[in-house]
């Protein structure tokens, strides 16, 4: 059985805000997109880089983590899915 491709939908609320940058930065974001590891658009690449930078700042203790709890039924569903193990049956 083939596994679904792509990432699961984001269960957290998202917000949009404008950002301005130079043509050089936009070109570099496009280079990252072309590697296939930073999303499909320059915007997705920028979001991924921002997220990675914030995670590094959290680890370094420069900023406080902000945790958003899922609704209890969503959290439980995620735990149950993780406990199910691999999707493909084990042949031994």
Image: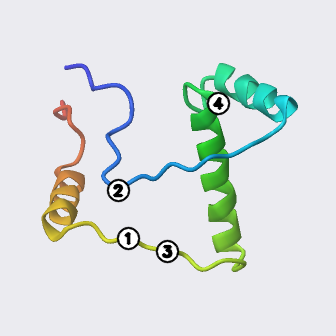
| Element at label 2 | loop
**N-terminal-most mark, 2 or 1:** 2
- The image quadrant where one finds the N terminus is top left
Work out how far the residue at label 3 is from the one at label 2, CA to CA, in angstroms: 13 Å
- Which of pointers 1 and 4 lies earlier in the amino acid sequence? 4
Residue 5 picture location, percent across and down = 35, 25
Q: CA distance from mark 3 to mark 4?
A: 25 Å
In x, y percent, where is residue 69?
A: 31, 71
Q: Earlier in the sequence, mark 3 or mark 2?
A: 2
Give the SS element for disc 4.
helix
Is there CB contact under 8 Å for labels 4 and 2? Answer: no
Instruction: Identify the residue at image location x=49%, y=74%.
Output: 66
Q: Tell which circle, 3 or 4, labels the residue nearer the N-terminal end.
A: 4
Quadrant of the rendered image containing residue 42? top right
The residue shown at (87%, 30%) is 24
Q: Residue lying farthest left? A: 73
How packed mark 1 is, by other alpha carbons closer than 10 Å (few <14, some 14-19, many 20 or more), is few
Tell me the element at label 1. Answer: loop
**Which of 35 and 42 lies nearest the eye of the viewer?**
42
List the residue tagged with mark 1: 68
Of residues 12 and 38, the one nearer the viewer is 12
Side of 37 relative to 15 (left or right): right
Are the residues at dot 2 and dot 1 in contact (C-beta closer than 8 Å)? yes
The C terminus is located in which quarter?
A: top left
In the drawing, does residue 27 fall left or right of residue 13?
Answer: right
Would you name the residue on which mark 2 appears? 12
Q: Which mark is residue 66?
A: 3
Q: Say which residue label 4 marks.
A: 42
């Amino acid at each position: 059985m083939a596994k679904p491709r792509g990432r699961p939908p984001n269960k957290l609320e998202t917000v949009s805000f404008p950002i301005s940058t130079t043509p050089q930065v936009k070109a570099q974001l496009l280079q990252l997109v072309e590697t296939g590891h930073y999303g499909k658009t320059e915007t997705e690449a920028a979001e991924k880089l921002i997220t990675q930078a914030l995670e590094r700042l959290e680890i370094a203790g420069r900023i406080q983590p902000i945790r958003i709890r899922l609704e209890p039924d969503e959290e439980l569903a995620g735990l149950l899915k993780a406990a199910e193990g691999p999707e493909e049956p084990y042949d031994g």
